[in-house]
Structures are given as structure tokens and as C-alpha cells.
Amino acid sequence: MNFQPPALLDGHRRRFHYLRLSITEVCNFRCTYCLPNGWRKADEAHPASYLTVAEITRLVRAFAGLGMSKIRLTGGEPAVRKDLADIIAAVAATPGIDKVALTTNGWNLRHRLPEWRAAGLTNLNVSIDSLVADDFHAITGHDRLADVLAGVDLAIGMQLPSVKVNAVLLRETAARGFDDWVRFVRRRPVSVRFIELMRTGDNADYFTAHHVGGSVLREWLEANGWCRAERRFDDGPAVEYTRPDHAGRIGLIAPYAPGFCDTCNRLRVTARGKLRLCLFGDGGLDLRDLLQDDADIPELRARVKSGLLDKAAAHFLHRNDPGATRNLAQVGG
């Protein structure tokens, strides 16, 4: 009989089996809601030092022993790391991990996806904030929509178990409507999830000008014949909707909705090895000192279990308090 690790629980009896692991803070896009001026080193005198493949291997092994079965690699933009395929392979080879996911802006997806898939990638999320080329360019700073869409279609053709698209819900998106996206999923078996714009430390003015509540999308979907889908065991925070005449789904991640944090099932580790109990929490619990030797893995697990007892019941976004998160690239979204 296979060993089943005990459930990893916080003080509110929530169970955690999903780790979002940032592997870099660097992003090569200049998205208006995150890094409008592009990524810059915080301190030129101390260049960024992100987790190595060996450290990531130990980290994932430790979390797998705590019951984590799904690892999502995030950034920044993970694909700026030249060793991304090695990282994917290390995660995929870890006993207990059955889903290896990647969130990417898709800038080199159609060129690198076969290598990542061969390394063990199972789940793919691609950020596409508009299907209109001019709007995509205006939001991201890059005229690469055609390349990104080609990468998504390649992923569908390769029959990855899960292909999803992330789009930030903006006031102008809602004003324009969602018909383009419905056409996009008409014959594509992908899930398009709109993420409600979130306040961070750096985007207060942008948030005020562009935020719109997720109820706009929810009401539109229900008025157009879309029905709420049943949640699966290791799903993230999205509520998804389906229609029988569409191959794909439309979803909503609404962090400002009441009770959003009640079903939290994921933890985060930053690219420098800090455990973040909440995307919008303060500080973090340093794990990196215990990633240098295999013998430290039991102590690492004990530190995670102890730290998890301090996880708050919910974030404080409704109070305009984003915690220590300056921008989403800093933590991994």
C-alpha cells in the first residue's frame, strides 16, 4: 500500500495540497497592472539570487512529504530561466507529485513547449489579457499576441491534460464585453479565467481607475446560458462555468468576493526561498537555510507545519491593504 502523508492543515482546518513556487522575480513584459516600467533590480549592488535546481529539488521533496501533490512554477516569468526544463524535470521526478504546472506569459511557448512537456509538464496556464492585438500590445508592451496564441494552440494539439488562459478583468474589458472570449472557447478545450484586478503596493492609482467587480462577468455568464461547474479536488480559486455547446470554459477568480479565502488550498514560496502564507500577507518564513542539505528536510517540514498555524483566516484587500506585495511579479501571483 502506498504511503499517504498526513493532511497539512492550518489553524482554520483548511487542507493544503497545492504549492505555487516562484522561480524568478524577473519578467520581460511590462504589463500596465503589474510592472508598467518593466522589471528592475531592487539593488544593483546585490544581484538577484534565486533558488537553484538543487534547492528546488529539496524544497519540493519536503512539501511532497507534507501531502503536496501539485506544484505550480511561477514568476515573474519562469521562462526567462534557461534551466526551466531542468526544474520541471526535477519537480516531475519527485515521488508524490502528480501535477507539474507552469504559468507563463507565453513569449517563447511555441518554441519551448515540446522540451517542457518532455521534461514532465502536465498543466499550463498562459496569461493573455486581450484577444485584440492592439490592446494586447498596450497592456503588455509587446506585439506578440499571434505568437502567444500559436503556443496555446500547440499545447492543445499536444493534448496536455490541462490548458488554461488567464486574463485580468479590467473596467475596459467588461465595457467591451466577453463575446471574443466565448468564441475563443467555442471549439478549444481550454478554460479562460478572468482574474479580478487586485490592489498591490505599487498600483493604487491604476487599481482605482481600472478595477471592476467580478459580479459583472458572473451576471453576464448566467444571463447567457453558462452554468457553474463542479469544483475538483485540487482546483485553484477559480469558479468555472460551462455550456454544452462549447468545448471550453469561462471562469472567474474574485478575491474581493465574500468567503474567497474559506477554501484556500495553496501555499506560496518566493524565488528567494520564503514561505508566504498568503499572497497579500506580510513578511514570510525563511526556508532557504534548510535547503542546503538533504538531512535538513525533516526540520524544514517541521518549520512549515509550525508556520502554517499562523496563517490568517483571510486577506485584507477589502481594506485596501495588500500586505507586503508591491507587485504580482514579486511573489508569483
Image: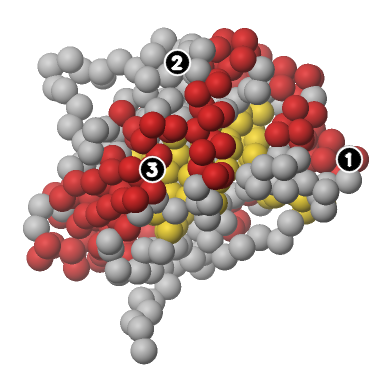
Please tell me whether residue 266 is drawn above or below residue 147 in the rendered image: below
Please tell me whether residue 11 is drawn above or below residue 86 in the rendered image: below
Q: Is residue 317 left or right of 35 when viewed as pictured?
A: right
C-alpha distance separating marks 3 and 1: 37 Å
Across and down, in percent, residue 215 comes to 78, 37
C-alpha distance separating marks 1 and 2: 34 Å
Q: Secondary structure at mark 3?
A: helix
- Label 1: which residue? 224
Q: Is residue 220 left or right of 117 when viewed as pictured?
A: right
Q: Earlier in the sequence, mark 3 or mark 1?
A: 3
Across and down, in percent, residue 205 comes to 57, 13
Q: Name the residue rendered at 65%, 39% in the picture.
A: 192
Instruction: Give the amino acid at mark 2.
Output: Arg
Task: Check disc 2: other Cα within 10 Å, few if <14, some if 14-19, many if 20+.
Answer: some
- Label 3: which residue? 114
Quadrant of the image occupied by residue 30: top left
- Label 2: which residue? 30
Q: Secondary structure at mark 1?
A: loop
Instruction: Give the amino acid at mark 3.
Output: Pro
Across and down, in percent, residue 219 comes to 84, 39
C-alpha distance separating marks 3 and 2: 26 Å
Q: Secondary structure at mark 2?
A: loop
